[in-house]
Every structure is written in structure tokens, then in C-alpha cells.
Image (spheres, rainbow, N blue to C red):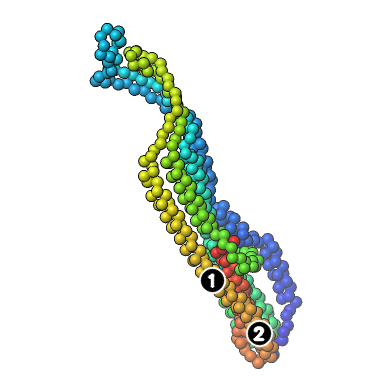
Amino acid sequence: MIRTIVSNSYLMRAFICLILLLSARAHAQTVTIDSLYILAEKNYPLIKRADLIRQTETYNIANLSKGYLPQVNVAAQATYQSDVTSVPLANTGIEPLSKDQYKAYADVSLRIYDGGAINAQKNVQRFTAALETANLQKDLYQLKERVNQMFFGALLLQTQIEQTNILINQLAETKARADSAVKNGAAFKSDADQLQSEILIQRQRIYNLQAGLTAYLQMLEAFTGEQINSVAMLVKPADRNIWLIEENNRPELQVFEQVNKLYDTQIEFLKSKVKPNLSLFAQGGYSKPGLNLLKNQFDWFYLAGIRLNWNFSAVYTLKNERRLLQINQQDNNVQRETFLFNNHLTRIQQDNEKNKTDRLIASDEEIIRLKESIRQAAKAKYDNGVITLNDYIKEINAVSQAKLNLELHKIQSLFNQYNRQFTIGN
């Protein structure tokens, strides 16, 4: 029978290791998923487009507003013509016009009424910018799904490492008792060697898990632009009871809405094209001849008035152009319905996954209770020489695996929650 003797020196070493572990964790870098969301969005190159979209909108609207300012046009011309106007009366004393004629003038016009064309064009620019911003937000939102995958992948590996370390500590405790028993002649050295071998196997497992964890952390580093230590502690998120939330706030819906608004604005702009334009104008210059065609010499001139322009030909295509925009709106609505349909299917799958994970977690807790009871019984049997060490190690591993399954299912449940949150845009 192996005696359960643990030396004072072993207790002291275990206590010191525990203090060092807690101290290292206290100073370890902690990483939360919400902080990763913020850092990933700030670091993603596409975020720079937000300011570019705002600047483009500002400049385009400013340029359109200048359409209300006086429009100035300066021109000059010199011509030689084959014939000129003449007066077929003798002895009139009127000098015939020269065949070479010259004119330099400035034309100024001021828009009074344009049928709302400029305002409609401004609205087109505003909704174009709003649509580009909505598309940008949609693209940036996709980052959250990628962060979810990397974060929870790393969290799964971190949890496996933690549970494996707990198993190693249990094996080390058993080995310490075996070492004491070997010294007292109550056990074979092969028992201690077998435990040491199992500890080394579990440490190898940690090496593999740590390599995978480091790869995930490096990907998160590249994504966020922030250095993340290889010993960083990923903070397990709190449960978020969002399964009763049905309101869909996905940014794609904003894109569909902005597209429809843009089409509405373009239809309003089409209407303005068939309305008249009214403006004041003035023209002044220096020419030969001047306004008095009977005076064949250089002279100053000016004229002013009001001008009406009405392009009736725009009516020809108005109906078809408006119909095309309405068809585009209908197509956009079909795409929106398709997105909502697929989104609903995804939520059904996630609800089923949640129900499955909840049942697994409930059964995990009962399995752990039973496995722990079996392990304790196996320990007593091993201490009394009824079963072999290998049988006892199997029960230790079984308890460890049951606890690991519980932790993994809990993380899977959190992952499901965050995926559901991503799906509904909450």
C-alpha cells in the first residue's frame, strides 16, 4: 500500500510556484474582445476612406453652390466676311461697313430660377456620400467576424493550456506521493517513471497548443497594429443574453436604404431637367461696328436683360429614365429581401447550435460529478493496491477531459452568442 505522505519541502515548493504564477498573471497583458474591435477598426487601412468621403462631399456641394454666383464669360473675335450690309440709296452719306470686323466683350449671367436642379444635384451628392459611408461601415463591420474567429480560436487554445496545466499539477502531486512511497519501499520506481512520462506527454501537448496560440496572437497583432505578448491573457467575455433580440441592425440594411434614397433623389433631379431656367444677363464690350450698324468704327457697347431657356427635348426621355431608376429600386429591394432571408436562415442555425451547446453544458456538469466520484474511488483503490497506476491515470485523464469539455463548450456558447450578435448587427 502506498502511503499518502507529502513532504514539507514539496509543500513549500508548490506554494512558491503558486505565488510566482499568480504574480506573473497579475502583470500579464490582458486582452478583451471589445478592445480588439476598436483597435482593428482603427488600424484597418479602409478607415481612411471615411475622411476622404467627407471631403469629397464637401467639395462637390461647394462647387454646386457656386452655380448661384454670377457666371462671367470673356470672349474676343476678329472676322473677315465676304459681304456686309449696305444701304442702296444714293447720297445718304452713310459709310459702308468694313468687311473686317472685331469684337471683344464680357458676358455676365445670374441664375434666378433653375427648376431646383442645383438643389437636386446637391442632394444626389449628399446621398452618394451617405451610400459610400454605409458601404464603408458594412466593410468595417466584417472585421468583427474575423476578430471573433481569431479571438475565440485563441481563447479555446488558452483554455486547453490552462486545463492541461491543471492536469500536470495533479500528476505532479501524484508523482510526489509516488516518490515518497518509492523512498519508503512502498512502491516501484516504474510508477514514478510512468507518472513522469505522462507529465512530459502533457507538456508536449502544451508546446503544440502554445504554438497555435502564438499564431493566433500574431494574427491579432497584424490585425490591430498593437503588440500582443505571447503570454497575454485573453479575458473570457461575459455572457450576453441576446437570444431574445430580434431587431436586425446589420449595416447592410443601411446600404439598401441609402441606395433607395439615392434613386429617389435622382428621380427628383430628372424632374428638374424639364423645367425652365431663368437668368439675368448683361454684356458689355468694344467692337467694330458697335450696336449701331450704320456707324463703321470702333465703339463701346452694352446690353442687359432677362433670359429664359427651356429644353423641351428632355421630356422625350424623362419617362424611360424614371422607369429605369424605379426598376433599379425594385432590384435593390429584391436584394434586401434576399439578404434578410439568408440572415434569418443563419439565425435559425445559430438557435439550434445554442440549444445543442446548452444541453452539452448541462450534461458536462453531471459527467464531471460522476467522473470525479470514479476518480476518488480509483485513488482509494490505487492507494490500497487494488488497481494499477495506469488505471488510476486513466481516471485522472478522464476527469481532466470532462472538465476541458465543459470549458470548451462554455467558450463555444460564448462564440455562438457573439456570432448571433454579429448576425443581427447588435
In the drawing, does residue 232 fall left or right of residue 312?
A: right
Give me the residue at 47% from left, 46% from top.
268
Question: Could you say which is closer to the camera, residue 357 or residue 326?
Answer: 326
Which residue appears farthest toward the front when viewing the image?
A: 89
- Badge 2 is on which residue? 370
In the drawing, does residue 273 fall left or right of residue 408?
A: left
Question: In the image, is residue 78 above or below residue 418?
Answer: above
Question: Is residue 145 among the parts visible in the rendering?
Answer: yes
Question: Could you say which is closer to the camera, residue 302 or residue 243?
Answer: 302
Q: Quadrant of residue 404?
A: bottom right
- Badge 1 is on which residue? 348
Counting labels gives 2
What is the CA distance from the residue labelled 1 to the residue labelled 2? 34 Å
Q: What residue type is labelled 1?
A: Ile
Give me the residue at 57% from left, 52% from top.
42
Residue neighbourhood size for the residue with mark 2, other residues' Cα within 10 Å, grouped as few (<14), some (14–19), many (≥20) = few
Give me the residue at 40% from left, 52% from top.
324
Q: Quadrant of the N terminus?
A: bottom right
Question: Is residue 415 among the parts visible in the rendering?
Answer: no
**Image location of residue 286, percent across then percent down:** 39, 18
**Image location of residue 398, percent across then percent down:** 61, 82
In the drawing, does residue 328 fall left or right of residue 254?
A: left
Q: What residue type is labelled 2?
A: Leu
Give me the residue at 39% from left, 43% from top.
315
**Image location of residue 310, percent across then percent down:** 41, 36
Question: In the image, is residue 259 above or below residue 194?
Answer: above
* Mark with earlier residue (1, 2): 1
